[in-house]
Image (cartoon, rainbow, N blue to C red):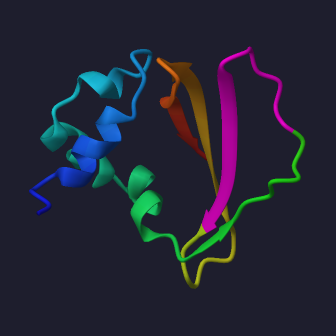
Amino acid sequence: EPTKHHGAVVATQHCSPRNRASELSPAVFAGYLQDPWYAILAEWDEMEFDDDEEEAETAVGEAEVQVLVRRGGDESFSMVSWLMSQHDERWLIDSLNIV
């Protein structure tokens, strides 16, 4: 059964060693998600993902994924961008940017 901060535990397990969030406790990481800047990650109602979009140039073993998200009632979308890298054949998150 899920425990308190279970989602934060899972999220930090998917952070790469390059990501300082990998060193945070689940409680501290969960606190970041309460910040209005990150709230869109849990509050979006609509998402647009274009898999035909031209891939951003990255090094071998690295990738960037961009998704547009919007809350119901909002006029504009926010772009969420993840930079990821492979570690032991797993894709892990190096950084997250919200614009």
Position in image of residue 85 (x %, y %): 57, 23
Residue 19: which quarter of the image? top left
In the image: residue 11, left or right of residue 43: left
**Magenta stretch bounds:** 55-69
Whether 51 is among the magenta residues is no
Q: In the rendered view, would you say 47 is above or below 73? A: above
Q: Nearer the viewer, residue 31 or 9?
A: 9
Give the position of the N terminus as an image quadrant: bottom left
Residue located 23% across and 48% down the image: 30
Residue located 22% across and 42% down the image: 9
Q: Nearer the viewer, residue 10 or 77?
A: 10
Q: In the rendered view, would you say 21 is above or below 29? A: above
Task: Say how many tags the image has.
Answer: 0
Whether 65 is among the magenta residues is yes
In the image: residue 83, left or right of residue 31: right
Residue located 55% across and 82% down the image: 72
Position in image of residue 21 (x %, y %): 32, 28
Position in image of residue 54 (x %, y %): 90, 41
Residue located 51% across and 70% down the image: 44
In the image: residue 83, left or right of residue 7: right
Residue 64: which quarter of the image? top right
Position in image of residue 68 (x %, y %): 68, 59
